[in-house]
Every structure is written in structure tokens, then in C-alpha cells.
Image: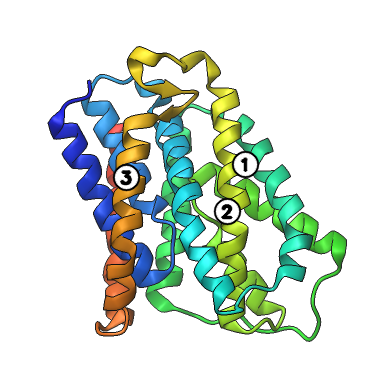
Amino acid sequence: MLDIQSIMIFIILGSFVGVIAGLFGIGGGGVIVPVLTMFFMSNGFETRDVVQISLATSMAIISITSISSFRAQHKRKSVRWDLFALMAPGVIVGTFTFTFLASNVESFYLSVFFSLFMLYAALKMFFGKKPQKQATEVGKKGQFFAGFGIGGLSALVSIGGGILSVPYLSKQGVDMKKAIGTSSAIGFPLAVSGTLGYIVNGWSYTYAENFMIGYVYIPAFICIAIASYATAPIGVSLSHKLPINTLRKVFAVLTLSLSIKMMIGLI
């Protein structure tokens, strides 16, 4: 049921996600998915589908918020468009394909996979180990299949792919700033492809009275996207003033705690 309280929850969530996106350069799916899942469960949505709805809505939000990110990176000439062109087709195919898998897996098992992935992401953020570089970049086929894998995993956990693509690019010797910029650019087709996949797979849920298009819950998408887009610059500003390494560790613990709470709620 949509009411003022629900809208306020979405706006607050979006505002928080925007700030952390600006602080850490991430899409925010690690927070959006578990919070939305718990919200949907407490508001009468079918348990069988709540994780899919959360993943789809989060992916739709990332498709909007990623625009400002990659445009800013492009202005700074931080995007390796040659690598983007090689990886993007694989990312698009992988993301779209894996939405079919996600749509046919029970919410509990999806939540288990999500929690395990968040554990991996949290450990990476907490310890911050840098990938070892290799001498040469991967060939065309390698970039395509790497993109396919990054897109596929991202579809299952609804992230922009940065936690996978940044270390992948860095390992090939790509400068860290360009790796982050290129990852931001890759996040846009990834999110659009994922959103379309979840809409196609969840088309039977499309009802105007329920504010649904496929698995995407429109009120949450609009409110969170607008709020996060507006507050992202605040996070960018704070990133130059606050102890980011300490905050990154706190955020890692937060995302892991939320994902575990989500999984327990589905038992």
C-alpha cells in the first residue's frame, strides 16, 4: 500500500544511498535491496517474489543514478572507451540473461546468494586489498566473457558492477582512476539491460493499481532515484573531508548486517 509514510521511507533511503554513492563511488544496491525487501515483506507483498522486486527496482534506480556518474567521469577523461566497447556487449548479454535465472529462483535462495556476495564485498571494502597487476590487457574474446560474467553476477545481486569491474580492470594495469571511470560507464548499459530483463520476466506483475511494471515497483524507483541523484554531490563533497577508509569499514559492516537480516526475515 502506498502512503505518505512509504514515500518518506523511499526518500530517506534514496538520500542515504545518494550520499554513500558519492562517498564510495558505488551504486547502493547493497543497501537498497535488503531495505526494500524488508519493506515489501512488511507491506503484504508475496514472500515468493519480494527479492526479485527489490533487485529489479534497485537495478532501475541504478540505471538513472549511473548517468550522472559516468558523465562526470567522461568530462574528466577517465573512461577507457576502447575497453568499454569490448566489455559492454558481454555485460548487456550477461545481465539480461541472468535476470531469467533470478526470476526463477525462490527469494530465500536469492537472499542467501546476495548475503554471501555482500560478505565478499564487505571483506574487500574492509581490508581494501589492491589487485596484482598483469603485464597485458585481455583480448577481445576475454573482455566479452569477462563482461558477461560481471553482468551476470550483477543481475543476481543488483549492483552496478563496480566491485567486480574495477579490480578486473586494475589487474590488467589500467590506472585506478580510469578503471573507476570505465566501470561507471559500464554500469549504465548493465543497469538498463538488467531493468529490461526484470520487466520482461515479471511482465505478469504489471498492474497500474499496484504501481508495477514487471518486477519494478514504480513509486520506490521514482522517489529513491530522485533523492539519491540530488544527494550524491553531498557525498562527493564529504569524501574530501571525512576519513573514507574508516567510513568504508563501517559501511561494509552495515551492508553485511542488512543482507543477513533480510535473509533471516525470509526464513
Gap in Å between the C-alphas at discs 3 and 1?
19 Å
Q: Nearer the viewer, residue 71 or 111?
A: 71
Q: Secondary structure at mark 2?
A: helix
Q: What's the coloring here? A: rainbow
- Please report the residue visible at 41 percent of the width from the left and 48 percent of the height from the top: 115
Q: Secondary structure at mark 1?
A: helix
Indicate which disc residue 193 carries.
1
Q: Label 2 belongs to which residue? A: 188
Q: Secondary structure at mark 3?
A: helix
Residue 45 visible, this angle: yes
Query: Which quarter of the picture shows residue 208?
Result: top left
Residue 259 visible, this angle: no
Comes first in the chain, label 2 or label 1: 2
Q: Nearer the viewer, residue 203 or 71?
A: 71
- Please report the residue visible at 31 percent of the width from the left and 80 percent of the height from the top: 244
**Left or right: 30 with respect to 173?**
left
Task: Using a 10 Å C-alpha cutoff, classify the residue at mark 3 as few (fewer than 14 neighbours), some (14 to 19) or many (20 or more).
Answer: many
Query: What is the x, y in percent for residue 53?
Result: 42, 30
Relative to 255, say whether 215 is above or below.
above
Q: Label 3 belongs to which residue? A: 224
Comes first in the chain, label 3 or label 2: 2
Residue most extreme to the left: 5
Task: Using a 10 Å C-alpha cutoff, classify the residue at mark 1 as few (fewer than 14 neighbours), some (14 to 19) or many (20 or more).
Answer: many
Indicate which disc residue 111 carries.
none
Amino acid at dot 1: Ser
